[in-house]
Image: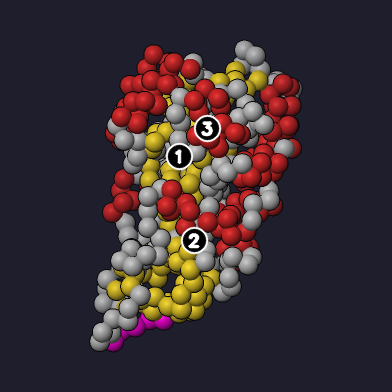
Amino acid sequence: MSDHTVLHVKGRVLVGPDDARDELWVVGGRISYERPAGARDVRTVQGWALPGLVDAHCHVGLDTHGPVADDVSEKQALTDREAGTLLIRDAGSPSDTRWIDDRDDLPKIIRAGRHIARTRRYIRNFAWEIEPDDLVAYVAQEARRGDGWVKLVGDWIDRGTGDLSACWPRDAVEAAIAEAHRLGARVTAHCFAEDSLRDLVEAGIDCVEHATGLTEETIPLFASRGVAIVPTLVNIATFPLLAAGAEAKYPRWSDHMRRLHERRYDTVRAAYDAGIPVYVGTDAGGSLAHGLVAGEVAELVTAGIPPVEALSATAWGARAWLGRPGLEEGAPADLVVYDGDPRADVRVLADPRRIVLNGRVVG
């Protein structure tokens, strides 16, 4: 497909959940709803078109051991692209992936810098590991390095107690979140358990990852403050295996993880019912494979979120939340075409017919 080719997408173009149009045109890499005059070299794609999917919790440049080489990062990004993920919020990576921004065939990335964790309270080689007195300085550093987000590790196993516990004192997170906001960055945090959530939300956090520890007491707090969650249910599915592996050494932690897993669907549905914004994220890149966005949408539906709302959590709603366009006039042509209506059955997302990135058919 040359730079002069005009792409014509016909069928149903899902500009919004209730806004389906018959066609769009791609000219110079951008979307138009007017047929270009004198177009000669036209390629037609037919089907149901959605904005490029969003994975709002993904780690490009990371595997189980830490940072990876650029060729591995490239394979990760390509795997996500082939699944229809064309916009990634990278929720923490120790690798410099800025070179991806120069590639018009790879997904667009919104970075949160590198994770910020408490000393010896996270996975080795993933994060900056610091003490509370340094938290403000490191948050400022990552706010300047990232693309408008900073990622904290809000809780992790405390080997002294043998269970999950909060990583940061209240005054430290209040000062750190205030500094991030002063620098124009939003803050999110990894949280599995219950006890870190109130302090983080009352300190002004913008989002919580996983959020398996939400309770009847904290759900209204999230809702009233408008704090979003990214449940990463395809990752939470691994909790029983993790618990079994640590049973002998950390029985309290293992039991806690199993309980969080058992109520995962109820937790997500209760959050949604309370009005908490819920977005799609897979947590790919640590121990989890890339390209699982369709599976995560299906998991949200299993949890009881209506299909169109689960779809919005990876399409229209997710893009608006991240401040990126969808299929508006003049927007970059990042879209995915399917054989069926994904609003009727989200399982359609698992089999993209065509992927268009920056106006080009790729993959």
Q: Do the numbered discs 1 and 2 sit on residues whose CB atoms are within 8 Å?
A: no
Residue at image coords 68%, 51%: 304
Q: CA distance from mark 2 to mark 3?
A: 25 Å
Outermost residue to the front:
224
Q: Please, what is the three-letter code of the amino acid marked with disc 3? A: His
Query: Looking at the image, is 304 positioned above or below residue 2?
Result: above
Residue at image coords 33%, 41%: 147
Residue at image coords 60%, 33%: 220
Q: Looking at the image, is mark 2 or mark 3 earlier in the sequence?
A: 2
Q: Position of residue 234 (x, y in %)?
A: 62, 46
261 to the left or right of 199: right
Instruction: Please provide the residue range marked out in magenta.
Output: 40-44
Q: Quadrant of residue 94?
A: top left
Residue 190: mark in rendering: 3
Circle 1 packing at 10 Å, graded few (<14), some (14-19), many (20+), is: many
Q: Determine the secondary structure under disc 3.
A: strand
Instruction: Name the residue tied to disc 1.
Output: 91
Q: Position of residue 184 (x, y in %)?
A: 31, 35
In the image, residue 42 lies in the stretch drawn in magenta:
yes
Instruction: Name the residue tied to disc 2.
Output: 84
